[in-house]
Image (cartoon, rainbow, N blue to C red):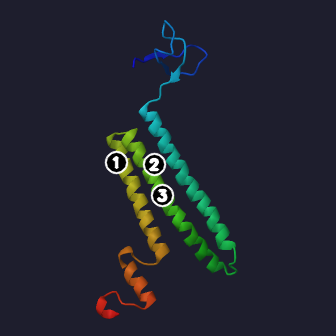
C-alpha cells in the first residue's frame, strides 16, 4: 500500500499527515487524512499511563489506609499500625508500576547511557524501598517468613519437629 506523507497545511495541527492513495484525490492531498504517530510518542503515552496508574494507586491507597485506620480504632497507636499496614501494600504496588513505567520509557524512548544509569539508580532505590517496606509490613525478613509463620502456628519447619 502506498502512503503519502505531507506537511499539514495552515490552520491544521502541526506534524505530517498520512493520506492513503485510495482515499486521496489526484494530487494526493485531498481526501482522508490521518495523523502519523511515531513509536516513541506511543511508548511515551504508554509510560505516562503507567505513571498515572502507579500514582493513583499510591494516592487512593493512602486515602483508603487513612479511612481504614480511623474506622473502628479508638487507640492512636493502634490507628498508626493499622494505617501503616493498610498503606504499605498499595505503596509497594504503586512503586512496582512506576518502575515498569521507567523501564518502558528508558528502553523504548530515551535509550542512552545516562538514561540507563539513571534507571539503574531509580530501580535500585525503589527495590530497596520495597524490600524495607516488606520487612516493615511483615515484621520479618523474606527468607525467614516461613519459619516465623510456622512458629506462630506452633508447628516446626522440619519434618521431624512436628
Up the image or down, 10 lies above or below 143; here it is: above
Locate residue 110, reporting x and y percent.
39, 39
Residue corresponding to mark 3? 95
- In this rendering, position of residue 127 left or right of residue 91: left
Residue corresponding to mark 2? 101
Q: Are marks 2 and 1 in contact (CB under 8 Å)?
A: no
Q: CA distance from mark 3 to mark 2?
A: 10 Å
Secondary structure beneath dot 3 equals: helix
- Name of the residue lying farthest toward the left: 160
Q: CA distance from mark 2 to mark 1?
A: 15 Å
Closer to the eye: label 2 or 1: 2
- Please state which of residues 13 and 81 is positioned toward the viewer in this rendering: 13
Circle 1 crowding by C-alpha within 10 Å: few under 14, some 14–19, many from 20: few
Residue corresponding to mark 1? 117
- Please state which of residues 139 and 28 is positioned toward the viewer in this rendering: 28
- Name of the residue lying farthest toward the front: 22
- 3 or 1: tag closer to the N-terminus: 3
Circle 2 crowding by C-alpha within 10 Å: few under 14, some 14–19, many from 20: many
Q: Quadrant of residue 77?
A: bottom right
Circle 3 crowding by C-alpha within 10 Å: few under 14, some 14–19, many from 20: many
| Residue for point 65% across, 70% down | 68
- Please state which of residues 84 and 23 is positioned toward the viewer in this rendering: 23
Up the image or down, 109 lies above or below 84; here it is: above
Closer to the eye: label 3 or 1: 3
Secondary structure beneath dot 1 equals: helix
- Please state which of residues 90 and 125 is positioned toward the viewer in this rendering: 90
Locate residue 119, reporting x and y percent.
38, 49
- 2 or 1: tag closer to the N-terminus: 2
Locate residue 143, reporting x and y percent.
35, 75
Residue 1 numbered tag = none
| Residue for point 61% across, 59% down | 60
Amino acid at each position: 500500500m502506498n502512503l503519502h506523507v505531507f506537511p499539514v497545511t495552515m490552520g491544521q495541527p502541526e506534524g505530517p499527515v498520512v493520506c492513503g492513495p485510495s482515499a486521496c484525490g489526484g494530487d494526493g492531498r485531498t481526501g482522508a487524512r490521518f495523523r502519523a504517530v511515531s513509536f516513541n510518542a506511543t511508548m511515551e503515552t504508554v509510560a505516562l499511563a503507567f505513571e498515572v496508574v502507579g500514582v493513583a494507586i499510591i494516592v487512593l491507597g493512602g486515602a483508603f489506609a487513612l479511612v481504614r485506620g480511623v474506622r473502628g480504632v479508638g487507640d492512636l497507636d493502634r490507628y498508626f499500625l493499622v494505617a501503616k499496614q493498610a498503606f504499605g501494600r498499595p505503596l509497594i504496588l504503586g512503586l512496582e508500576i512506576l518502575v515498569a513505567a521507567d523501564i518502558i520509557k528508558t528502553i523504548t524512548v530515551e535509550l542512552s547511557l545516562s538514561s540507563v544509569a539513571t534507571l539503574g539508580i531509580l530501580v535500585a532505590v525503589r527495590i530497596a524501598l520495597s524490600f524495607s517496606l516488606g520487612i516493615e509490613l511483615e515484621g520479618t525478613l523474606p527468607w525467614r517468613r516461613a519459619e516465623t509463620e510456622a512458629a506462630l502456628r506452633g508447628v516446626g519447619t522440619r519434618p521431624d519437629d512436628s
